[in-house]
Amino acid sequence: MTRRWALASAVVVVACAAPPTDAPGSAVPPPAPSQITTPQIATPQITTPSPASGTAMVVLTFYGGPDNDPPGPAIAHPNARHGQAGGTGTYEDPITTASDPRAVPVGTLLYLPSLRKYLVMEDDCAACIEEWTATRTGHIDVWTGLSGSELLACEEALTPPGPVLVEVGPPPDRPVEPQPLYSEETGCLA
């Protein structure tokens, strides 16, 4: 006979001897030491993606030079890849993304299927930090460009009404849209 008990998030399985078939009241000898089994704890299955790979649903917004803090291309975490905000959206040159570093560690590579762009976390976002602190809601803010007459309108047009899927730690072979998110020449990708 096997009995199962749920303890927190683990399942304990204990093997027990079958009940005696002798007459009621008869003594049952204790099991020999070789017949005693120790409880086995089953490892719970974790279904959420790890921070290093998988997918996540996040709030997605966009920012550029005029609404950066301070205004311009400065980033909170300059690195060998980018000394300031930028990127084309390829695997080799992902677009600067801001978030809460507790939610998305600095240097994390992301892929945004809805826009077919690679992103890299290398800037802080005040609204993202507030959301993560208050509700543990993932929020990324993607660099759209330094300037342009329609840049802010493009940021608004690109921002979806609800959470979107992002891939965390993507491979280098995802399709990439070559058009920039915004430029004076090509307009807005939205």
Image: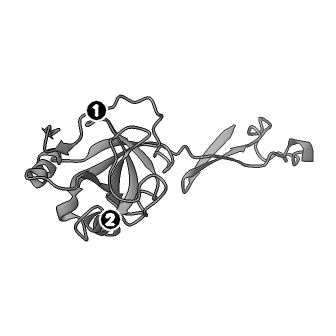
Q: Which element carries disc 1, helix, strand or loop?
A: loop
The percent coordinates of residue 79 (x first, y second) are: 47, 59
Q: Nearer the viewer, residue 79 or 23?
A: 79
Most extreme residue toward the front, as rendered?
185
With 35 as the anchor, is 147 left or right in this view? left
Indicate which disc residue 178 carries.
1
Residue 43 in the figure: left or right of residue 73: right
- Say few, some or many: other residues with alpha carbon within 10 Å of mark 1 (under 14 / 14 to 19 / 20 or more): few
- Frontmost residue, 97 versus 187: 187
In contact (CB < 8 Å): disc 2 and disc 1 = no
Give the numbered dot on residue 81.
none
Label located before the other in sequence (2 or 1): 2
The residue carrying pointer 2 sits among few (fewer than 14), some (14 to 19) or many (20 or more) residues within 10 Å by Cα, namely some
Residue 141 position, x and y percent, is: 27, 55
- Alpha carbon distance from label 2 to label 1: 24 Å
Q: Which residue: 32% across, 51% down?
A: 86
- Label 2: element kind: loop
Residue at image mark 2 = 74
Q: Quadrant of the C terminus?
A: top left
Which amino acid type corresponds to the residue marked 1 in the rendered image? Answer: Pro
The picture places residue 144, in percent across and down from the top left corner, at 23, 50
Residue 129, image quadrant: bottom left
Which of these two is toward me, 160 or 172?
Answer: 172
Q: Decide if residue 132 is on the left or right side of residue 44.
A: left
